Image: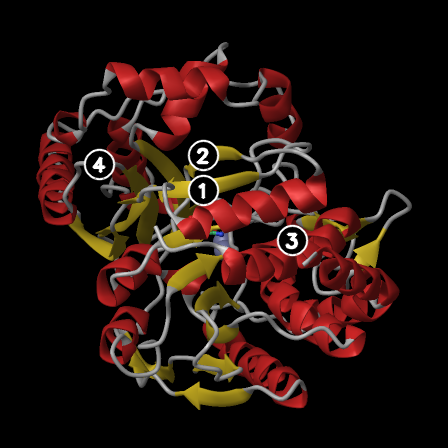
Amino acid sequence: MAPQLDSFFKQVDTSADAFIERLRKAVAIPSISAEDARRPDVVRMGHFLADELKALGAEVELRPLGKEPHRPHLDLPPVVLGRYGNDKNKRTILVYGHYDVQPAEKSDGWATDPFTLTVDDKGRMFGRGSTDDKGPVLGWLNAIEAHQKAGVDFPVNLLMCFEGMEEYGSEGLDDLIREEAKKFFADADAVCISDNYWLGTEKPCLTYGLRGCNYYSVEVSGPGADLHSGVFGGQAHEPMTDLVQIMASLVDSKGNINIPGIKEQVAPVTADEEKLYDTIAFTMGDLHESLGSTTTIHDETKPTLMARWRYPSLSLHGIEGAFASPGAKTVIPAKVTGKFSIRTVPDMDIDTTNAAVYKYVEEQFAKLGSKNSMKVWAQHTGKWWVASPKHWNFSAAAKAVERVWGVAPDFTREGGSIPVTLTFEEATGKNVLLLPMGSSTDGAHSINEKLDKGNYIEGIKMLGAYLHYVAEEPQN
Ligand SMILES: C[C@H](N)C(=O)N[C@@H](Cc1c[nH]cn1)C(=O)O
Ligand SMILES: [Zn+2]
Ligand SMILES: [Zn+2]
C-alpha cells in the first residue's frame, strides 16, 4: 500500500498544474441551474465532464431527465453516469457530485470575474463552483488520471453519478436513483459524496448528517401594473407592504422561528449527544473568519454548532419583482414574490412543516386586512439525513485523512443540504459518507467563492487514498 500511494501522491503533485487547468475549464462554463438562460451552459458542462471521463477510459452515459417540473419549457440537464473499472474482485464505490453552480455576477461584489478561475499569491483559486462542487467532482477524475500516469492499479471500481440540478433541489434525480438502484448502481458497496466543507481551515472532517431544506415562495399581487407612488401611494394596497410584513413575521433577529408547529417536531437532544459537541475542533474565531464578521447570534461554540446542525433555521432570501437597483425609483411594484427556506432536522416531517407554514402565512396575511391576493407554495423540499459513521466506509476515509493531512478527522454534521443523500442511502441500502475537500472560508454560494490550491491537490490525494483504504477495509 505505502509505496503505491507514494507513487500516486507524487504523480498528483507532478500533475497539479494540469489539474488546475481542468478546473479552470470547468469554472469557465457558467452552469447556473437556477437561470433559464444558462440552461445550455449547464448541458455543456455535463458534456464537458462526459468527454473528460471518456478520455480517461470510463464508460459514460448522458441520461436525459425530461422536462423540468413547473418550468416545462426547459429540459432538465442530463445526469452523467460513469463507470471506471469492472473487476468482480474489487469493491465498487459510487460517487456523487454536481456540476451546476449557484448564480454569480461580477456586480454582486466579486473582486474577479466569477467564471474566470483566478489564483492569487496565497494559492486561493477564486471562481464560481471552485469548491461547490466542480473542484471535488474533478477530484475523482484527477485521481483516475494520476493512477494511470503513475502506473498504479486503480484499487476499486468507480461508479459515478454527476447531476446538473443540485442547486435547484435535484429535480428529477430521486426517480433516477430509485430506478437505477438495482441496475446501474447495483454493484455499489458504499457511497461517497464530496460536496461540503470542513468546519474550520485546519482540520478535516467526515460528515454523517445534513439538514433538509424546504424552500418557499409567497406571492402578493394587486395592481394591474407597476405604479407611480406619487399618483397611487396611499390609495392602493401595496403588495410590497403586505409581503414585508408577512416575511418579517416568520423569524426574529435571534433566529427564533415564529411559526407554530416547527420547533415542536424537533427530536430532544440526548445527554450523550450533547457531549459530542465538546470535542469538536471549532472556535468562534473559525466562524468569524468564514462569516467575514463577528455578527454571531451566539457567543459560544456549542449553541452555535447546535444551531447549525441540530435545530431548524429560517432564512429570508429575497424578493422577486421588488425594485433592487441602485438609485431611487418611485415605483409601487404590482407583484412581488418573497423567497425563504427552512433548514429541517430530525424528526421534522416535510408535509407537517409545509402545512404549518401555509397556515401561518395565510393567518398573517388575513390579519393585514389587505385587498391584495396572496399565494404561498413550496418550490422544493428535501429531507434531513443522519447516518452511522461506524462503518468501513468511514474508517477508510479516516485513514485517508490521517495519511494525507497527518491528523484524525472530526466526525461532524452539516447545516447545508444535499437532497439526494438520503435517497442514495434508502435506494441502495448502502452506507453514505460525506468526504469534504474545501474549508470553511471557501464562501460557497457567496461572492468570491474559492478553493485553496492545497485543499484541491491534497484533496485529490485524499480521494485516491480513500479508495485504496476502501479496498483494504474488512467488512463491518
Ligand atoms: C451542501 C451543498 N454543497 C449545497 O450547497 N447544497 C444546497 C442544496 C439546496 C438547494 N436548495 C435546497 N438545497 C444547499 O444546502 O443550499
Ligand atoms: Zn454543492
Ligand atoms: Zn451549493
Residue 258, percent from left and from top: 21, 24
Above or below, 383 against 311 in this view is below
Amino acid type assigned to the residue bearing label 1 in the image: Thr
| Category of crowding for the residue at label 1, using alpha-carbon neighbours closer than 10 angstroms: few (below 14), some (14–19), many (at least 20) | many
Point out which mark residue 462 bears: 3
- Taking depth in this image into account, of 159 and 452 the one nearest to the observer is 159
Above or below, 409 against 52 in this view is above
Q: Which residue is mark 4?
A: 346
Point out which mark residue 412 bears: 2
Quarter of image, res 191: bottom left
Q: Which sits earlier in the primary sequence, circle 1 or circle 2?
A: 1
Residue 34, percent from left and from top: 45, 65
Of helix, strand and loop, which one carries label 4?
A: loop
| Category of crowding for the residue at label 4, using alpha-carbon neighbours closer than 10 angstroms: few (below 14), some (14–19), many (at least 20) | some
Residue 425, percent from left and from top: 28, 58
Q: Which residue is mark 1?
A: 207
Q: How far, Cα to Cα, is label 1 from label 4? A: 16 Å
